[in-house]
Image: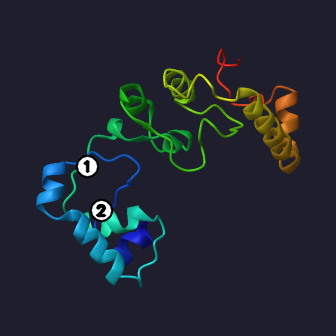
Amino acid sequence: MDSEKRTLGVQRYFNSGVLLVDLDAWRSRETEDRLREFGEKRRDIPRLWHDQTILNAVLGNEILFLPVEWNLMVHCLQEGRRGQPEAARASVAHFTGNAKPWRYNPHALPFSEEYWRYRSTTPWGKDFPFNSLKRQFLWEKIRLAWRHPRDFLQSLIGLEAPWEPAIPKGLEP
């Protein structure tokens, strides 16, 4: 992100996966036109993160950062970059990076069970194909075990956490 900040000439940088937008201000400042104009005129700037790049370039000095619990990036918890106090107060868990509840994770993924619980309350959550997901997770588990045999063997003899598909308990069909 530091190189992107330098390229864009901004001091602060935000992830655009979770946004709270004041629509009256957005419209009165003609933000959509400004974003489009920047995208058309500044084709020399690489779009590393697609819309996020343009949003940061145009709105970099007009944004307000909310407290971390309103956009808690789950991969930061996994990497130990943020502690448990933020997790305990989290109102929005944002699955950034490669760690997603719907993908295989060899280690526990914070907020995964909450994701599946809330998804099950949606119209499409009841019809989720768990059997296909289980097969995908099993294949990924085998692939990772092949790539990391030492870790896999340690998990078998109890030196590491077991390598289980990260389907939350109780949500299997």
Location of residue 99 in the rendering, given as x and y in whole percent from the top left corner: 60, 43
Q: Position of residue 54 (x, y in %)?
A: 35, 68
User: Which badge, 2 or 1, is on the more N-terminal residue?
Assistant: 2
**Residue sitting at the far left:** 28
For label 1, the SS is loop
- Nearer to us in this view, 25 or 148: 25
Count of picture labels: 2
Circle 1: residue type: Phe
Quarter where residue 108 is shown: top right
Going 55% across and 50% down the picture, which residue do you hit?
Answer: 97
| Horizontal arrangement in the rendering, residue 38 relative to residue 63 (left or right) | right
Quarter of the image where the N terminus is located: bottom left
Q: Secondary structure at mark 2?
A: loop
Q: Which amino acid lies under the numbered mark 2 shown in the image of this protein? A: Arg
The residue sitting at 84% across, 50% down in the picture is: 147
* Residues tagged 2 and 1 counted as in contact (Cβ below 8 A): yes
The location of residue 18, given as percent across then percent down, is 37, 46
Label 2 crowding class (10 Å Cα cut-off): few <14, some 14-19, many 20+? few
Residues 35 and 89: in front is 35
Residue at x 19%, y 60% (from the top left corner): 62
In the rendered structure, find residue 65 and report the number of the disc placed on it: 1
Distance from disc 2 to disc 1, alpha carbons, whole Å, reads 10 Å
Q: Give the residue number, with chain letter if any, for mark 2.
A: 12
Residue at the spot 16% in from the left edge and 57% down from the top edge: 27
Q: Which part of the image, by quadrant, shows the C terminus? A: top right
Instruction: Decide: is 92 above or below 75.
Output: above
Judged left or right of residue 115, residue 33 is left
The answer to which image quadrant residue 51 occupies is bottom left
Does 28 sit above or below residue 75? Answer: below
What x and y, as percent, mark residue 81?
A: 48, 45
10 Å crowding of disc 1: few (<14), some (14-19), many (20+): few
